[in-house]
Image (tube, rainbow, N blue to C red):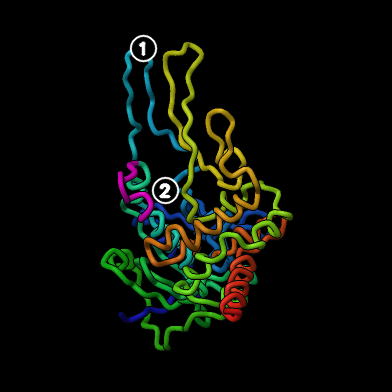
Amino acid sequence: MTAMMLDNDRVVDFVTHLQENKPVYAPHAKGRSSFVFDQVEKPDDVVLDYPRTLHSIKKFFLPPQDDLLDFNLVENSFTEPELKPFDAVFLGVHSYDLHAVMRLDYVYSQGNPERNYLARRQGAVFVGVSFTPDKHHFSGSVGIGTNDTTGFDVFLHIVDDGYAVEALTEAGTDLLQGFDMPVYEGALPASAHFEQHIYVPQGKLLDVFDHGYHSVVWSDEAAHCTGCGTCNLICPTCSCFNVEDHVDVTVTHGTRTRSWDSCMLRGFGEVAGGEVFRENLADRQRHRVYRKFKYISDETGEPWCVGCGRCTMNCTAGISIVNIVNRLVNEYDKSRAAV
């Protein structure tokens, strides 16, 4: 499709146009160096040139706390909450974060489809924007370039003096109707260079992880890990949760609530009687990384890590998932060479 040119000085007008169609959620500055997705009230608060947000857009479809049902113990009855689709425009989404949403779509649509998540997903329109990788990004290593338009309705490619705007779906074309832009005359830019790399393709990683279960890497990393769970809680593809029933003081009514959980926390693997299935931090660290590159990948053929770099950037112990994987690769290569 023909790309259109959006000059920098018309970005605020563009955001205003989107607001006339649907509610808009976009990155906003938070403090000196952080960014968050939030609903747009003032178009000039939108930030399109940013490294990453603290949390991904997952939080809108899978909130940190989610009421699943209200129940009445006397009447032995329950009601499910009314769910409203996120009929909104998500502006300024990076490619890796939309790939993360698509992975969550898979998780929550398999087996028994998950009502709350799938209901909220309806109606969302995604307007992507390319980005300049920093030292923590490595999405290129998992097949997601800075200009990857997969899943988007509209995509903004960073070019000189503005953005080359592509409408990729019918919904995207409808969204741009009524906002005049000249045709972009140049070639669309290629994906930017990444500083961080996993040096083997996913096909080889499946073999690497087949042989890495008993690696010393896990105990080495566990020696630094504090088990705080930050890596899970800011990951855009983590989908594990805990469910609790909260009963009022009359022991009559209650609410069943789902909350984000972390496999890096000791209590995650604890069952009745006090048994903990992953007592050691090394076992938990291994489980976390295998969930990203092995367990689900065996079924889907693609990594469940999207290379956003959030876990490494926010790790209180400075642990890098890229370094972990590359160490496993080196161990695997040495073992193959010794055969």
Q: Which residues are magenta?
A: 106-115
Task: State the residue at coordinates (33%, 67%).
Answer: 176
- Residue linked to disc 2: 61
Q: From the viewer's perspective, tell me whether residue 94 is left or right of residue 177.
A: right
Q: From the viewer's perspective, tell me whether residue 278 is left or right of residue 294.
A: right
Q: Position of residue 185 (x, y in %)?
A: 40, 88
Q: Position of residue 35 (x, y in %)?
A: 59, 57
**Residue density around tag 1, few if under 14, some if 14–19, many if 20 or more, within 10 Å:** few
Q: Quadrant of the N terminus?
A: bottom left
Residue 9 in view here: no
Labelled pair 1, 2 in contact (Cβ < 8 Å): no
Q: Is residue 241 above or below residue 205?
A: above
Which label's residue is closer to the chain start, 1 or 2? 2
- Residue linked to disc 1: 74
Residue 108 in view here: yes
Distance of label 1 from label 2 (alpha carbons): 32 Å
Amino acid at the residue labelled 2 = Phe
Q: Is residue 296 above or below residue 332?
A: above
